[in-house]
Image (cartoon, coloured by chain):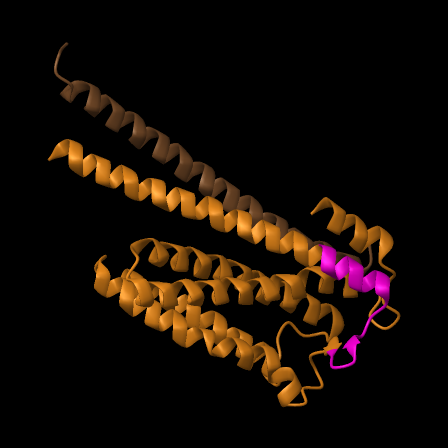
């Protein structure tokens, strides 16, 4: 593998890793939002007067 | 993005001067232009904040600047790798284009420090918007610095005579730029949706626990 090939792979690899990290962060945030929404739904159910 | 990769590596010819390392250009330059677009969009939304006092524009401005900063960091990293491959150094302070882009990037990094040092509310929205608008003035300075200062280190590909590359190379560049812009826009929309959902859940929690 030539030096130029290593540099090109590194440049494109950095972009790929950045996008991958961003996806992981968004996935973690989505999981947190889902948890919070479930908690609020539970809270709303508990507050609802019995029919 | 797949089309861009195919165009870059299988269709576009290898540069006669730089060889394979020139392939970094097809990602580095579109990423830099996308960073400018992110900062520009952030400034436009900041102007809407000041104009309409709309809270939603503050979140949009923040998200756009966040994307601009992510792509700005990628510009600096891919640029450093390309510099090492072409010039033999990771960085040179004698290139105005590089230094001005670094200044622009650091200016927007400070935007986050300013924003998170203030209490959420109309005051933070206004101060953040004014700061974002000041930053946008640096974009044309950074973009045209290379032409104004006769910078011989950083190459000038786009001149008044048009792009200094073959038609296939230019097509590959345009496809790569479209792919990067679409990626950035997708990231912007997803981030914005996440932040808005976060705000709605916060409001809902306050309403339910009141």
Where residue B207 sits: x, y (%)?
16, 36
Q: Nearer the viewer, residue B108 or B205?
A: B205
Taking the magenta stretch, the answer to whether it contains residue A19 is no
Q: Quadrant of residue A45?
A: top left
Tell me if residue B69 comes above or below residue B103 in the rendering: above
Residue at 70% across, 70% down = B84
Residue at 79% across, 55% down = B8
Where residue B22 sits: x, y (%)?
78, 66
Tell me if residue B6 comes above or below residue B127 in the rendering: above
Which quadrant is home to the C terminus of chain A?
A: top left
Residue at 54% across, 67% down = B36
Q: Nearer the viewer, residue B5 or B39?
A: B39
Residue at 56% across, 44% down = A20
Q: Please report the bounds of the magenta region as a residue range.
A: B159-175
Which quadrant is home to the N terminus of chain A?
A: bottom right
Relative side of B134 to B140, left or right: left
Where residue B60 sits: x, y (%)?
40, 55
Chain B color in figure = orange
Tell me if residue B123 comes above or below residue B93 in the rendering: above
Q: Quadrant of residue B135?
A: bottom left
Chain A color in figure = brown
Tell me if residue B26 comes above or below residue B18 in the rendering: above
Q: Quadrant of residue B146?
A: bottom right
């Amino acid at each position: 593998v030539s030096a130029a090939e290593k540099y090109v792979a590194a440049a494109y690899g950095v972009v790929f890793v950045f996008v991958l990290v961003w996806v992981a962060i968004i996935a973690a945030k989505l999981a947190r939002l889902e948890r919070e929404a479930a908690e609020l739904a539970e809270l709303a159910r508990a507050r609802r007067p019995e029919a | 993005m797949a089309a861009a990769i195919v165009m870059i590596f299988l269709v576009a010819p290898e540069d006669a001067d730089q060889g394979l390392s020139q392939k970094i250009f097809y990602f580095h330059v579109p990423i830099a232009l996308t960073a400018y677009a992110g900062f520009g969009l952030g400034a436009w939304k900041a102007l809407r904040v000041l104009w309409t006092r709309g809270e939603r524009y503050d979140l949009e401005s923040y998200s756009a600047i966040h994307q601009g900063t992510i792509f700005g960091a990628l510009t600096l990293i891919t640029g450093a790798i390309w510099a090492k491959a072409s010039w033999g150094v990771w960085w040179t302070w004698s290139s105005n284009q590089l230094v001005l882009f670094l200044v622009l990037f650091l200016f927007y990094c400070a935007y986050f420090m300013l924003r998170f040092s203030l209490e959420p509310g109309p005051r933070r929205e206004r101060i953040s918007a004014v700061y974002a608008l000041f930053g946008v003035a640096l974009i044309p300075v950074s973009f045209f610095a290379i032409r104004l200062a006769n910078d011989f280190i950083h190459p000038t590909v786009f001149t008044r005579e048009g792009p200094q590359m073959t038609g296939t190379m230019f097509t590959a560049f345009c496809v790569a730029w479209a792919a990067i812009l679409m990626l950035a826009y997708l990231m912007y929309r997803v981030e914005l949706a996440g932040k808005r959902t976060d705000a709605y859940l916060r409001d809902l929690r306050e309403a339910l626990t009141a």
